[in-house]
Image (cartoon, rainbow, N blue to C red):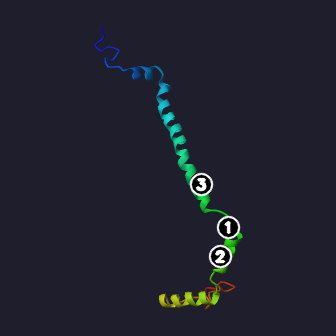
Amino acid sequence: MPPFSSNPLNETGYSRLFRRYPGLFGVPFVLLIVGASYGMQQFTQTRYDLHSQKVTAMSKEQELGLQKNRKQFDIREEYFKLSSTAAEDWEPKRIQRPKGVPEWGVPPEEPPQKKP
């Protein structure tokens, strides 16, 4: 008689069933995934319904009301607003140009020749 028996003492019905049919082990996982997808369907549909309520076409009366209450845009006013705040924050400074580069940064037509 062998020192260890081949049948364990506390073998349950599930362990025998899973040992006999190993593919059956994944069935609860698949059922959970499929059930969760059907369960989440209602939440997803609510999300898309709320989004479609926010993005709707405007009627002609609403468009006219928006155009009537619109503030007039003046490019000069915006320019002065931006330039007044920019003048406080920084000051433009000239830097020294490398030798051989003209004042405005345009490279010369021919490269400078080195003298021997």
Tell me: residue 104, above or below residue 48: below
Q: Secondary structure at mark 1?
A: loop
> Which mark, by number, is residue 49?
3
Indicate the amino acid at tag 1: Met
**Residue 99 image offset from top left, x and y in percent:** 57, 88
Quadrant of the rendered image containing residue 103: bottom right
Which residue type does callout 3 highlight? Asp
Q: State the residue position of label 1.
A: 58
Image quadrant containing the C terminus: bottom right
Q: Earlier in the sequence, mark 1 or mark 2?
A: 1
List the single residue furthest toward the right: 60
Along the line of sight, the residue nearer the viewer: 53 or 30: 53
- Looking at the rendered structure, the secondary structure element under dot 3 is helix
**Sequence-earlier tag: 1 or 3:** 3
User: Horizontally, is 10 left or right of 112 in the view?
Assistant: left
Mark 1 near mark 2, Cβ–Cβ under 8 Å? yes
For residue 27, say whether it is visible.
yes
Instruction: Please name whichever residue, 73 or 57, is drawn nearer the observer in this view of the structure.
Output: 57
The numbered disc on residue 24 is none
Residue located beneath label 2 in the image: 66
Circle 1/circle 3 CB separation < 8 Å: no
Q: Secondary structure at mark 2?
A: helix
Q: Position of residue 97 (x, y in %)?
A: 56, 88
Can see residue 115? no
